[in-house]
Each structure stands twice: as C-alpha cells, then as structure tokens.
Image: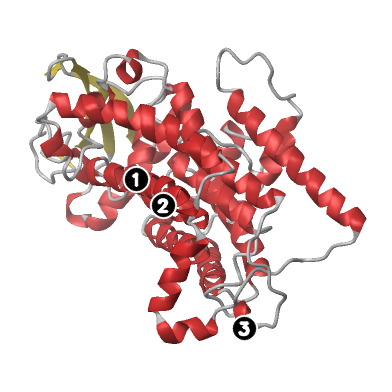
C-alpha cells in the first residue's frame, strides 16, 4: 500500500505540474490573495501560500517529488510519511477548487500511514534487525479500516434519491453526462436494463453490503480477500466508464493494506530474490505506559471525530460538532465528504464556448482557432479538459458561489492565447456555457446559453 500510495502521489504531482502556472501562481486562475480573501478558513495553512511565483512553486513541487521518492523506497519511512502528508496538505490547500473526493481519501490514508508500520516490507527499512510480530493490530489500523468502510457506507446513506434506491436510473443519468462518459461507458449507455441492474448492484452490494462485511471481525482470510477484491473491481469498473481522474487509483491503492497476509505471502514466494530484502514481520513498538494511553486516547477521539464529521452530512442526524471543531479540522485537514453522486446524480451537462474579441471588433473562436463561432456540441466533451483537475475547476467555475474566480480565469485565457498567438491577439473574451439537461428515455431539454464571464485584457480585475 505504501508503494502504491507513493506512486499515486507522484503521478498526481506530474499531472498538477502540467498546469502549475494556471493553478498555483499569481498569473493563474487563483492567486493566493484571492483565495484568502474569498475562501479563508481559520488555521488553514499551506507552504504554497508563502510565494506565488513560478520558481517558488516549482521548487516545492520538486521537494515534494523528492520526498515521495523516498516514501516509495521505504527509507526512514515514518519521517518521509510525515513530510509527504505535510506537503500533500499544503498542496491541496493551495487550490481547493480543483479537488475531488479521492484527494480526501489519499490525504487521510497517508495520515493513518504515519502511525502504521508500512515501512517494514519492500523497503530500505526492512533490512534493519527488528522484533517479529506476525499480525499487527492497533487503534491506528482500526481507524484506517473504518476510514475505508466509511467511504462506501456514507456514500450509500447519502444516496437517498429514487434514481438509486427504486428506479435504478442513476447510472443512466451519470452516463448521460458527456463530460464524464468515457471508454465502455458509450457501449453500456445503449442498454438501459443493464444499467439498471448495475445501479442496484453498486448501491446495494458494493456500497452497502461490502463495507459492512469488511468491518466484521470474524471473517476468514479468503473472505476478506473477496471483499477487498470487490472494491478493486468496483473502481476498475468506474474508471472504464466515467472520467474520474486518479480517483480509482487512489481508492485501489488505499485498500491494499486490507489484503490478507496469505495473499501477499504467495506474491513473495514468486518474486524470489526480492524476498531476501523483506522483513518477516511487523515491529511492535514499546512505549511508556503514559504515552501509550495518550496515543490510544488520541485515536479514539480521532475516529469519533471523523464519524461525527460524516454523520453531520445526514439530514436526520441531529447532533453536529461544535463550530470550534473546525480548528482541528483545518489544522489536521480531516475534512472529508463521500457523497459522490448523491443524493442524486447531476442531470445537467454542457460545454464551454470561448468568444474572443479582436481590436477591430471582429470575433474569434479561441478554442477551435477560427473566425466563426462554432456552437455545435463537441464530439468528446471530456477531451476539452487537459486533466480531471481542469474538469473539476470547470465544474466549480459554473457555481455562482465561486464567481469571484471568473475574471481571473478569463484574464488567464487571454494571456495564454496572446502568448501563443502573437499574430492573432484578442483584447477581450466572453466565456459562455451551453447547458444541456438530461431527461428520461434518452431525451434532453432545449439547450441554454449562459454567459459566465466577459472581460478585457486591460480591464482591472475585481
């Protein structure tokens, strides 16, 4: 799990670095000053707040990659797990408008990894002479187990709409979103009955039954392997039908620590020479009695805190955490939300049109790079976004609660266009969203054009 989590973090860094200027500098869509003015949270912190320059952000990305490399190697694992968590929290806090639920899971698994012995296998640390404990259990591993189960249990609880529970049309509406539908999703979309069966299978088996079985203390190793394999199959299915970025990879990597040891033993037996570099068991740390009680109390509070945080999203739950709890949440970044596609699936989809204005008052379609505006629906809407980070930003960009970002995005697009096309500059830009609403039986409502932002290069951004 440590190696898989490290590889995911490294992959995420590479994807994020491809849009470093846009998402992390003062020349991008969200300068730090704008974030702190409109979306400030008590005690939320980030190393990335200190400087908005490309050079500084690049430096932090390089350090983050260096730290992740040593986490993957398992060299001084606990130290580099702590540093990885610090840099991941810092990175996620820098631009919260490109985040998705998988980022919460990645961050929390890494946090619990600080307290678990995941540095004693397939690692540089495994060469040390350490005491042998065949099985490992602690409150930290219990918290990790509850975390994985919570993702699916609370996701199911919040799916209260008929589309999930009685009609079975949730997958139909999800695959009606052209900005999400990929791979075999196009093929599956032709079969309404099959989509209905899969909707109920996802809701009642994968999200309700599987996590409950995962929490049972008396399951056999083979049964545990079957449950974990079900989670992996679910996310492979999601990745093959819906554009979710690294969410599927994060979810699969995050559950690998639950695989039975007997399964891993079979892998060890097949890799021969590598086995010599592995330790034979977990290190059982001996702590002073007082410190041990303090550690256990911390994890009891932590587990309870996370459960209350999730229960707070359920309307029928009357008890919520005190407002002062947000200080703990923001310092440790324990916030989490597993309500994916809930309480119902979005039924509105659409695409953007970028209408540029030149000095001679003529217009230019800067997306298709031609003088006439192309209002037709793109064949592959998902390909309009370089990464899922941009797709998530575009989703939040439509939200009127975040309209303070719109002029900055507009200015960024003008600058980037003029930099790449000095012979064909534009002075202004109108960003238009074409809204398409999905209806039952493969029908759609009439298209609606929404002007999200109109700005000019020399206009002061407010």
Q: Find the distance from the CA under tag 3 to the CA under tag 1.
A: 34 Å
Q: Position of residue 209 (x, y in %)?
A: 44, 32
- Give the residue at mark 1: 235
Q: Are marks 1 and 2 in contact (CB under 8 Å)?
A: yes
Q: Is residue 250 left or right of residue 113?
A: left
Q: Find the distance from the CA under tag 2 to the CA under tag 3.
A: 27 Å
Q: Position of residue 47 (x, y in %)?
A: 63, 56
Q: Circle 3 — which element?
A: helix
- Give the residue at mark 2: 252
Q: Is residue 8 left or right of residue 431?
A: right
Q: Circle 2 — which element?
A: helix
Tag 2 or tag 1, which sits nearer the N-term?
Answer: 1
Crowd rating for badge 2 (residues with CA inside 10 Å; few <14, some 14–19, many 20+) = many
Q: Find the distance from the CA under tag 1 to the CA under tag 2.
A: 7 Å
* Nearest to the observer: residue 180 or residue 239: 239
Residue occupying image coordinates x 43% and y 42% = 98
- Give the residue at mark 3: 127
Q: Is residue 112 visible?
A: yes
Crowd rating for badge 1 (residues with CA inside 10 Å; few <14, some 14–19, many 20+) = some
Tag 3 or tag 2, which sits nearer the N-term?
Answer: 3
């Amino acid at each position: 799990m440590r190696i898989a989590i490290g590889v995911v973090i490294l992959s995420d860094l590479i994807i994020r670095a491809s849009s470093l200027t846009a998402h992390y500098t003062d020349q991008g869509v969200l300068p730090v000053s704008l974030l702190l003015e409109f979306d400030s949270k008590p005690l939320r912190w980030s190393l990335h707040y200190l400087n908005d320059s490309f050079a500084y952000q690049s430096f932090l990305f390089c350090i983050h990659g260096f730290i992740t490399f040593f986490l993957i190697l398992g060299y001084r694992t606990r130290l580099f797990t702590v540093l990885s968590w610090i840099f991941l929290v810092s990175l996620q806090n820098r631009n919260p408008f490109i985040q998705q639920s998988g980022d919460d899971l990645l961050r929390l698994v890494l946090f619990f990894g600080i307290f678990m012995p995941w540095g004693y296998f397939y690692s540089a640390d495994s060469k040390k002479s350490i005491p042998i404990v065949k099985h490992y259990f602690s409150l930290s591993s219990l918290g990790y187990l509850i975390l994985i189960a919570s993702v699916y249990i609370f996701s199911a609880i919040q799916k209260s709409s008929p589309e999930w529970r009685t009609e079975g049309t949730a997958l139909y509406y999800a695959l009606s979103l052209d900005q999400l539908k990929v791979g075999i999703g196009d093929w599956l979309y032709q079969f309404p009955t099959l989509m209905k069966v899969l909707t109920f299978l996802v809701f009642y088996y994968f999200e309700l039954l599987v996590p409950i079985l995962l929490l049972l203390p008396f399951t056999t190793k083979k049964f545990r392997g079957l449950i974990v394999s079900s989670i992996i199959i679910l996310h492979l299915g999601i990745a093959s039908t819906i554009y979710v970025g690294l969410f599927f990879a994060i979810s699969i990597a995050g559950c690998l620590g639950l695989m039975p040891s007997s399964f891993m033993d079979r892998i060890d037996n097949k890799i021969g020479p590598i086995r010599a570099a592995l330790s034979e068991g977990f290190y059982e740390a001996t702590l002073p009695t007082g410190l041990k009680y303090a550690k256990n109390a911390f994890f009891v509070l932590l587990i309870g805190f996370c459960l209350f945080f999730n229960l707070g999203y359920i309307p029928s739950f009357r008890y919520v955490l005190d407002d002062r709890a947000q200080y703990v949440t923001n310092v440790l970044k324990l916030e989490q939300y597993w309500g994916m596609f809930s309480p119902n699936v979005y039924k509105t989809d659409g695409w953007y049109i970028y209408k540029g204005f030149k000095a001679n008052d003529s217009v230019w379609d800067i997306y298709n790079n031609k003088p006439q505006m192309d209002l037709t629906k793109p064949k592959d809407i998902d390909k309009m976004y370089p990464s899922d980070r941009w797709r998530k930003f575009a989703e939040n960009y439509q939200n009127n609660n975040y309209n303070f970002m719109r002029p900055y995005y507009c200015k960024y697009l003008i600058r980037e266009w003029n930099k790449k096309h000095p012979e064909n500059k534009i002075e202004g830009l109108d960003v238009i969203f074409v809204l398409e609403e999905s209806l039952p039986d493969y029908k759609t409502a009439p298209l609606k054009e929404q002007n999200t932002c109109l700005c000019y290069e020399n206009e002061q951004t407010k």
